[in-house]
Amino acid sequence: MEKLILRRVDRNNEEMILNFGPQHPSTHGVINFIVETDGEVLRKAVPDVGYLHRSIEKIGEVTGWHGFMPFTDRIDYVAAMFPNEGYATAVERLTGIEVPRRAQYLRAISCELARIASHLVSLGTMSMDIGAFTPMLHGIRERETINDLIEALCGARLTYNYHRIGGVAFDLPEGWKERTLAFLDHFDKFLVEFDRLISFNEIYVRRLANVAVITGKDAVDYGLVGPNLRGSGVDWDVRRDLPYGAYDDFEFAVPVGQGFKGTVGDCYDRYYCRCLEMGESSKIVRQALLQLPEGEIMAPKVARNLKVEAGEALSRVESARGEMAFYVVADGTNKAYRVRARTGSFTAMGIIESASPGLMIADLVALIASLDVVAPEIDR
Amino acid sequence: MAKIDSEVGGDVTFFHTSQLDQLINLARENSLWYLLFGLACCGIELIQTGGPRADLMRFGAIPRASPRQADFMIVAGTLTYKMAERAKLLYDQMSEPKYVISMGSCANCGGLFQLAYSVCKGVDKVVPVDVYVPGCPPRPEALTEGLIRLQDKVRNERWQDKRRAPVQGTGAA
Ligand code: SF4
């Protein structure tokens, strides 16, 4: 393929084809973009994915129902709670296992903490791509605290493997509730500080506002999900509109892009939606901790060697990167016939080709960062 | 280093007897710059290790984006066959003397993905590895330990031995 060759197309103008990635600090993982430029202005950028294809879905057909859970972590490692939950929910729908209320609350708590952790990385790396290094370190600092909390909960810092088919693996450790509430008090103040530090920074705003506008119609047509979709002004959140687990018990707002500093659907809207979402997640965790019901954390009698009647099921959860769907097919044995994950980052790749023409090369970095893609979610 | 005797006053001469090798190694081991090569999940732990708590920079390790400025490479994450080619290319672009830390089970041996058809079972199939850090993902402390082991290695070798004749024009990239 000609794409791997760096070449000048025509000596009379500035056209050239560049490879941006796969090893580049601002591609957020291993993704390659084949960039056609005319001088500094992009003709178009075409994503070339597959550098992190780890055949996770295929492995799902060999491991058995329970055994696939650790692999779901690796589908979205920045917020590994969501694939856990999505897969567990799908299998529960398939088998008709009822999850105890307390376990559903614990799932919501762990997921929202993971969402905050994921957005912190996303916003931090985004500001680093734009050229501000400090916010990244602030984000990582807060993330360390969340990592500590989750580590106390399930023993892992990154690949949690916390949810189980039929519940969650561990109950809250002693003193965890107070520690988390104390952290949330601190975190709400941190959000204000973070806004002052970077979100309302004049240079930063000018770098992002009115850049790479994605209209609401385009966002729907290309199948964008999550903060990318809401950043374009479409009011859709699975947690609120198709509630699963414990989410119908909580009060929370769904931030929607409204042209905070420029046009609806620009990079700044997508950025700021994530900032606001962190505040909402913190509210959800607080409510869930205060209302936490007593009871079991695991459904009774979930067989170790689970055999599932032939059938299929779909689950939809709102992950940090948007709607994540798991589709599982059973054929009556103790292994899945097919496991399929539908992830937000993959569809977000699709819009880059049509959103990029006319951007400067430096703005392409802003566009990619604002879409918040994670490489294994694209390739699985 | 001669002890400064504050009682004596006047001319105090600093001196340090050593071998040139040791002196050079002292400088080298404390300024090992690494190539940011986060491939998968372990890449996030790599970021955390460079972050405020673990702070890899206090050992003189500074992340570089370009292989030409890097002394060693931390391969953090799963290496797929498609990426393996690129990893080799990046390794070749680094200047001698160069080292490789393999971080995480995936980079060590394929880890969790033994059954996967698209995963290269270990980065040592492509480039030589100096330090293996186990874990899935290794904690920041473990990676720091890995760096300290690498420093040990650098300290105890003759730096000239590490220099190889330059590869004659392969025309790569
Ligand atoms: S060793 Fe584990 S955490 Fe690291 S890249 Fe492999 S699967 Fe991910």
Image: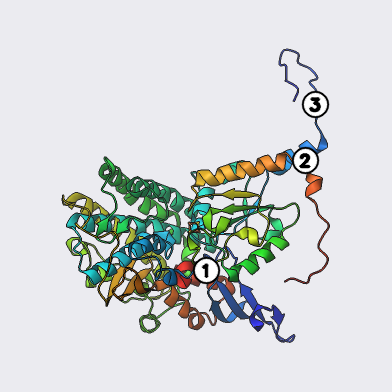
* A236 is higher (above) or lower (below) than A193: below
Find disc 3 in the rendering and name its residue: B15
* B25 is higher (above) or lower (below) than A375: above
**Same-subunit check for callouts 1 and 3:** no
Q: Chain of mark 1?
A: A
**Same-subunit check for callouts 1 and 2:** no
Find disc 2 in the rendering and name its residue: B24
Tell me the kind of residue under disc 1: Leu
Residue B8 placement, left or right of B57: right
Residue drawn at x 27%, y 75% is A313
Residue A334 placement, left or right of A268: left
Q: Which circle, 1 or 2, is nearer the viewer?
A: 1
SS class, disc 1: loop
Q: Quadrant of the N terminus of chain A?
A: bottom right
Gap in angstroms between the C-alphas marked 1 and 3: 54 Å
Quarter residue A265 falls in: bottom left
Q: Chain of mark 2?
A: B
Instruction: Specify the label residue A52 is tagged with.
Output: 1
